[in-house]
Image: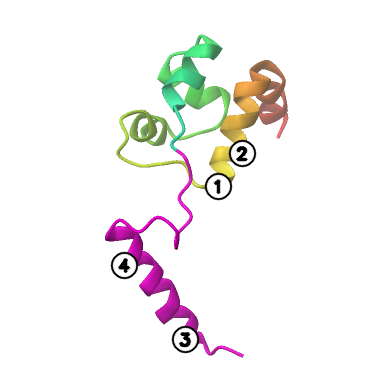
Amino acid sequence: MKSAFDKIAAGLGDAIAHANGETGRARVAAPIDVAAIRKRTGKTQDQFARAYHLPLGTVRDWEQSRSQPDAPARVLLALIKAEPAIIEQLVQRA
């Protein structure tokens, strides 16, 4: 069984390999076009943020590629892309 140190060292090795251009050792999520998803809803950034209970600054950062959505946000965005009105209703009830 690997120790915590061994696991951390292996992860660091994978990160270094990825930074050096090796593609087989790391899993990188595909970019998500948040602006396109928002535009499909017909909402401004502010309206989109309020409708789905997201911080406006976060929506702006995603759209301007200053940051990427984490895994739970990616799920929410995929749901919004598929069914924006239904997801908005569900979020407003929560």
- To which quarter of the image does residue 55 belong? top left
- To which quarter of the image does residue 94 belong? top right
The residue at which mark 2 appears reads as 75
The residue at which mark 1 appears reads as 71
- In the image, residue 18 lies at what x, y percent? 35, 60
- Residue type at tag 2: Val
Q: Residue furthest left?
A: 20
Residue 11 located within the stretch drawn in magenta:
yes
Measure the alpha-carbon separation of dots 2 and 4: 28 Å
Report the residue at 30% width, 39% height from top: 66
Q: Earlier in the sequence, mark 4 or mark 1?
A: 4
The residue at which mark 4 appears reads as 16
Measure the alpha-carbon separation of dots 4 and 1: 22 Å
Q: Which mark is residue 84?
A: none
- Residue type at tag 1: Ala
- Residue type at tag 4: Ile
Q: Residues within 10 Å of mark 3 (few under 14, many from 20)?
A: few
- Contact between labelled residues 3 and 4, with CB atoms less than 8 Å apart: no
Q: Earlier in the sequence, mark 2 or mark 3?
A: 3
Using residue 66 as the reference point, say whether residue 78 is left or right of it.
right
Report the residue at 67% width, 30% height from top: 91
Q: Earlier in the sequence, mark 4 or mark 3?
A: 3
Comparing 59 with 1, the one in front is 1
